[in-house]
Amino acid sequence: MKIHIKNGRLIDPQNGIDAKRDLFIAAGKVVSIGNTPDGFAAKQVIDATGLIVCPGLVDLSARLREPGFEYKATLESELKAAVAGGITSLACPPDTEPVLDEPGLVEMLKHRARQLNLTHVYPLGALTRQLQGKHLTEMCELSEAGCVGFSQADTPIADTQVLWRALQYAATFGFTIWLRPEEVYLARGGVAHDGEVAARLGLNGIPSTAETLAIATILRLAKETGTKVHLCRLSTAEGVDMVRLAKKQGLAISCDIAATHLHLTEHDIGFFDAHCHLKPPLRTQRDMAALRAGLQDGTINAVCSDHTPVDDDSKLLPFAESEAGATGLELLLPLTLKWAQENKVDLSTAIERVTSAPAKILGIDAGHLAVGSDADVCMFDPDRYWQVEAKSLISQGKNTPFLGLELAGKVRHTLLQGHTVYLAP
């Protein structure tokens, strides 16, 4: 179908575009920007007056809960939530049931996603069998099945020799290893940041050192092996400083932050609010300020939703017994815009952190709108406020610390390869 998107403010950070320009789409591809192609007769005209037109968002961490946890969410429900949030490409961690450690499971997941045809899904394969941290998976076979990288999800590898061998193996084939830095023994049994709030509430704490010690180990091994490593969801000021120095030294390191950690601290736990039980835990005001600054200066490459839908029963338990995680697909864009506004960051930079930057980490051709690229497009109203309520979320998971908050930035229209996959009511 030939589509003409007119009167919108087109922002494409990768290609340096931020101007009022029309976009022309045919056969699922961008065919022209600004000028009408010869002989182009649009079958659909979309008036984007007052809207930002940008590449479809790219999310680096979204748990889709299939296979194995369909009572928490389904692939269909979460992909519908993704496109409602303007997300057209996403990576899913391997901590499903069964774990994504066999090529057949990866192929099945990708086949299901293709059938739904809502969002491009890029699985991360398990780094070790059953995520047990003992035996490496067949990374080459998993890569051939469609995995874009290899991860332990939220299960750290305690045995550094296993981690060493994994990085050596990955370096041989040019694979990227995704690790959430956490020292397993320091974090054992912890549910909140090891600080004044945890002490007052009587909660077992996870010290900042659990993250920084793990980062130090990972960086040293990455330097020795030359492996590409992506650090998932930094949470500490010291961690940001360590990554900044590693990048200056030329290490092949990238990192991201969860959108929740841009806005919340340990004090938001309040009186045992289980919606604030997250991995990694919410930390101090100083940490949050460092994370915001690190994202602004590019030390932190991207923002992810860290989407983790949890059923109501698992969140109604006492804080320490509740399941960690928050839903985030529909909040990724407005929370990123909120950070940009509060830190006086220009809109193009904010959009870059959720489009082309994460696409580069995934190694995929997405997150931009160059002529010839897939017409994966997000159109949103940056000035439209909406209230986060359980009934307003399409995701099956309604668990978020932002319930009741008004946020600016509402997606109005999402295209996947030139086809409408979401249209706001």
Image (spheres, helix red, strand yellow):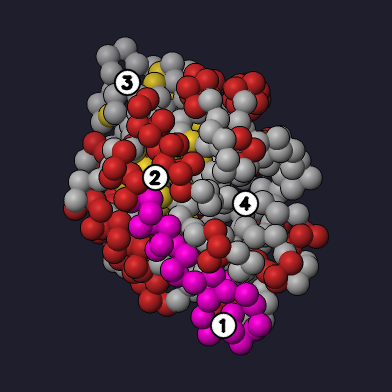
**Closer to the eye: label 4 or 3:** 4
- Residue type beneath disc 1: Val
Label of residue 197 in the image? 1
Query: Is residue 383 one of those drawn in magenta?
Result: no
Q: Place residue 319 in its image quadrant.
A: bottom right
User: As drawn, which residue projects farthest toward the top?
Assistant: 39
Position above or below: 376 against 12: above
Q: Position of residue 212 (x, y in %)?
A: 40, 63
Q: Secondary structure at mark 4?
A: loop
Q: Place residue 378 in its image quadrant.
A: top left
Instruction: Specify which label sits upstream in the sequence, 3 or 1.
Output: 1
Q: Residue 264 versus residue 277: which sits nearer the camera?
A: 277
- Residue type beneath disc 4: Thr
Q: Which residue is mark 3?
A: 372
Instruction: Specify which label sits upstream in the sequence, 3 or 2.
Output: 2
How far apart are labels 2 and 4 at the CA level?
A: 19 Å
- Residue type beneath disc 2: His
Which stretch appears magenta? 192-219
Query: Is residue 194 one of those drawn in magenta?
Result: yes
Q: Is residue 233 visible?
A: no
Q: Which residue is mark 2?
A: 230
Relative placement, left or right, of 82 versus 323 is: left
Instruction: Specify which label sits upstream in the sequence, 4 or 3.
Output: 4
Q: Residue at x 53, y 52 (%)?
A: 158
How far apart are labels 2 and 1 at the CA level?
A: 30 Å
**Closer to the eye: label 1 or 4:** 1
| Contact, mark 3 vs mark 2 (Cβ under 8 Å) | no
Dot 2, crowdedness within 10 Å: few (<14), some or many (≥20)?
many
